[in-house]
Image (spheres, coloured by chain):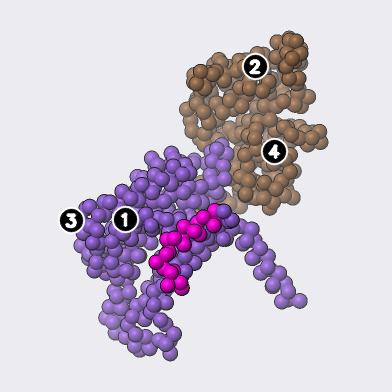
Amino acid sequence: MLGDFLNPYYLQVASFIMINIILGLSIYVTLSSGQLSLGNAGFMGIGAYTSALLTINYDMPIVVSVIAGAIVAGLVGILIGIPSLRLTGVYLAIATLGFGEVIRVFMINWESLTKGAVGLSGIPQIGRELLKVSRDAGFNPLDIGLKNNQYVYLLVLIILVIINILLIWFLVRQNKSRVGRAFAAIKMDEKAAEAMGVNITYYKVLSFVQGAVISGFAGALFAHVMGYISPADFSYHRAVEILIFAVFGGSEVIWGSIFGATFMTLMPEVLRFISEYRYMIYGAILILMMAFRPQGIIDVPLLQKLQLSKRRGKHGSKN
Amino acid sequence: MVLKINNITKNFGGISALTDVSFSIKEGEIYGLIGPNGAGKTTMFNMITNMFPPTSGEITFLDEKITGFKPHKITNKGICRTFQNIRLFSQMTVLENVLVGGHTRSKSGVFSGVLRTKGQRAEEERLRVTAKEILELVGLSEFEDAIAENLAYGQQRRLEIARALASDPKLLLLDEPAAGMNDTETADLYHLIKKVQERGITTLLIEHDMPLVMRLCDRITVLNFGKKLAEGTPEEIQNNQAVIEAYLGSEGDDESA
């Protein structure tokens, strides 16, 4: 039976991978115009709190509140982006890191709204809500041989996978369009891009805001998968973790941050016994990567090699 | 007049890079801007494209004042430049470089790009056709899928011109296009600039290769230490005593041209 294969623990880890991939994509899209933003943990927090509070206080449906969370994160992204995009490189990184901390301090101190450092609990969970809906419709998970928690985790994972596919599709297509070329041109040579008529302010703000919207979206999903959030979830550590997805996996191609997010989420689960030392290992990985493979594990030449060997493989099978 | 430079002065701190320079360019002309190193030629390009604003003075393009416009807006108006130290998008393919050049002549945004609407697909197709035609013109058709940084030096210079042409300019600014080229490449460049002229595009050319400048240009302005030294036809410039002195030095102690 299907039920024998589905371990709720694995399903949950897979869901976390999916959320982290969204976060990896959020830093990738901003990097694709050559800007390093470390504020995505902050935007994630804004999305999470917005969506959680809308559902708790106003009984809003989760679908609506998640989208609202992403939009609010995007609006804050516009406000932060326009002034801070005068900065480049390491200055922008530090300014956005500071922004993330400001957001976290807000969450801790605005106790009347956010319940402070204790965090928000009892956030409606996507899985449970769906279980309720299917029960009301007269469907019992046991009919297909699934326990309730298996059914819930499976549904959540399926939804997250679909979201990821749509998001990757969106970004891959954007990359191949006029907007993607403008991003790449700015990344490679800002002055030349400007001389070719690319409105660099507009496209920089656009990619920054896209990063904010995507991380806000990831934060909102995180809130409704976990059911509990606190300011500690969106701290400096989270910002560094998101950065490592891109740095480790590769920041030049979309598959880099996807790989990075998957690997870095799986690693502490596989190596449970050393998870206490996770941040130490992160640090060591960053140093080693900078020394030996600054472009990350996955880069353009590697992808070309993979494509070539695939083509060769096909050719070989024909003969 | 396509371009009118009126009394442009540019100071960097206490140093005057350009002092009260004026000249104007007629439609269809190939206009030369020459002078020893550090005379302020590239600074003048930066003034025209407003990469730096002038300290004083005014520039008009097709009777419209463009001083103070953002650089991308000036490109949109129809002025596009190349760079002295080649600034291609080095990891893009040759074709993609030219497609970026067509940025101002297209308008699809995030959603039409992602959804590949009918209009967006037609626009991409049009950009590609134009880009390929321009690559044919500069003689880089066979390299369209090559990565820009892998091209030979002379080819990279021609790709810069192709990228600028893709923005469909009325005025093309070329900053030392023949630098580092051998004789054959320079001869090809001569024909390319002539072909650009036949398309009705006006050219402003900075160049140190004097035989090329003298053959190509209809009129020339000579700058020296940020000031206009002379203006005239190639013949007039060649016989101008002040120009000869600036280039050869009055006692033969300066760099030769």
Q: CA distance from mark 3 to mark 4?
A: 63 Å
Q: Residue at x 35, y 45 (%)?
A: A79
Which quarter of the figure has residue A176?
A: bottom right
Residue type, mark 4 in image: Arg
Q: Which residues are magenta?
A: A268-290
How packed mark 1 is, by other alpha carbons closer than 10 Å (few <14, some 14-19, many 20 or more), is many
> Both on one chain, marks 3 and 4?
no
* Chain drawn in brown: B
Q: Quadrant of the C terminus of chain B?
A: top right
Q: Residue at x 64, y 58 (%)?
A: A301
Q: In the structure shown, which secondary structural element does the residue marked by tag 2 occupy?
A: strand
Query: With respect to residue B23, does A147 lie above or below?
Result: below
The chain ID associated with circle 3 is A
Q: Looking at the image, do the residues carrying marks 4 and 2 touch, with CB atoms under 8 Å apart?
A: no
The chain ID associated with circle 4 is B
Query: With respect to residue A245, does B149 lie above or below?
Result: above
Q: In the structure shown, which secondary structural element does the residue marked by tag 1 occupy?
A: helix
Q: CA distance from mark 2 to mark 1?
A: 58 Å
The shade of chain A is: purple
Furthest toward the left, the residue is: A112
